[in-house]
Amino acid sequence: MVSELRSAANAQGRGYAGDALREKYRAERDRRLRSDGTDQYVATVGDFAHYLDDPHADPTFARAPVDETVDVAILGGGFGGLLAAARLVAAGIDDFRIIEKAGDFGGTWYWNRYPGAACDTEAYIYMPLLEEVGYIPTRKYARATELYAHCQRIGRHFDLYGRAYFQTLVTEARWDE
């Protein structure tokens, strides 16, 4: 296929073969499509319900339901949620909450703690707010433990722990103008 792409590129007088490349991508996509769609997934009920449990959180955690009105609700405490919260703090907006299902900040890096887990994007590109928190990644491709610790570092630096509800699942959201 590579030689076919090169030949097509040369014949078209450009460095890539647009039509041939699109056809290759289309063929690869079609090869991966499954006729069973979402039916291929197993529901996390019955014997699989324990996969929804958080093995890292305090099993004795309990809190009364919260009924609170805030200006901003951030759903998720991964890098996206942390970055949004940090920018709100910088803008002087204090009336917000971070709602996170897990027991701490971290998103992907909270859940993925298996040996050897790491990010395949360079740390200086992937890790947000490095300058703001005064941190330098230890490796070009940060490991999961460092990324998880960085999420906690952001939470401490911007005083986000007091604005977060951990072990909290959002089941409904409504827009009210």
Image: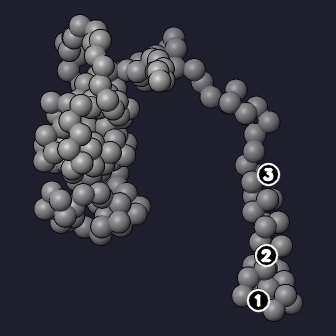
- Residue placed under numbered mark 1 in the picture: 14
Q: Residue furthest right?
A: 11
Residue type at mark 3? Asp
Q: Which mark is residue 30?
A: 3
Q: Which mark is residue 18?
A: 2
On screen, residue 126 above or below 161: below
Residue type at mark 1? Arg
Q: Residue at x 29, y 12 (%)?
A: 67
The answer to which image quadrant residue 108 occupies is top left
Colouring method of the image: one colour
Task: Give the camera-side residue of 89 and 106.
Answer: 89
Q: Crowding near pointer 2: few (<14 within 10 Å), some, many (20+)?
A: some
Is tag 3's residue or tag 1's residue first in the polypeptide sequence? 1
Residue type at mark 2? Gly
Whole-percent x, y for residue 127 in the image: 30, 58
Q: Is residue 73 visible?
A: yes
Q: Residue at x 40, y 63 (%)?
A: 121
Mark 2 vs 1: CB contact within 8 A: yes
